Image (tube, grey):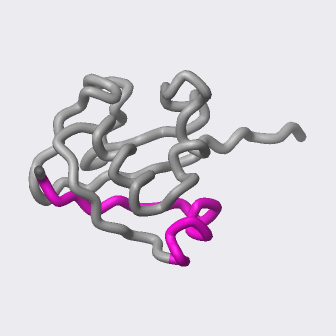
Amino acid sequence: MATINVRIPQPLQKLTQGKDVVPAEANDIKALLDDLESKFPGIKDRLCDETGKLRRFINIYVNEEDVRFLQGEKTALKEGDEVSIIPAIAGGSR
């Protein structure tokens, strides 16, 4: 298993005891989500829908690359990778 640093957005930091970066052990994004859930119960419900798929408004980046353009939840992770969880922000109207 690779040790990964995960950047947590401010709205989810209440689940990570206020930490904006947490370590995780995983070889891919799916395993990363499971590891985060084991350490911070409830976080996966915020990131995934009832079928376990990543919610549409949640963006996950591995080393600044969107996993949607890689292999999604099967995107491989290696030691030292940095994962960022970023909720989508909708724009307003004028």
The number of numbered discs placed on residues in the rendered structure image is: 0
Residue 12 to residue 14: above or below: above
Residue 57 image-quadrant placement? top right
Q: What percent of the width, then of the height, locates residue 79? A: 10, 55
Identify which residue is drawn at 36% across, 35% down. Answer: 66
Residue sitting nearer the eye, 32 or 91: 32
Identify which residue is drawn at 59% across, 29% down. Answer: 49
Q: What percent of the width, then of the height, locates residue 92? A: 82, 41
Does 4 lie within the magenta span? yes
Residue 79 to residue 60: above or below: below
Describe residue 24's horizontal placement relative to residue 1 as left or right: right
Residue sitting nearer the eye, 90 or 54: 54
Quadrant of the frame with the C terminus: top right
Describe residue 71's horizontal placement relative to residue 68 as left or right: left
Q: What percent of the width, then of the height, locates residue 83? A: 32, 52
Q: Give the range drawn in magenta.
A: 2-18
Identify which residue is drawn at 57% across, 65% down. Answer: 15
Identify which residue is drawn at 61% across, 70% down. Answer: 14
Describe residue 63's horizontal placement relative to residue 87 as left or right: left
Residue 70 image-quadrant placement? top left
Describe residue 28's horizontal placement relative to residue 56 as left or right: left
> Hey, which residue is sitting farthest bottom in the picture?
18
Q: What percent of the width, then of the height, locates residue 1? A: 11, 50
Residue sitting nearer the eye, 77 or 16: 16
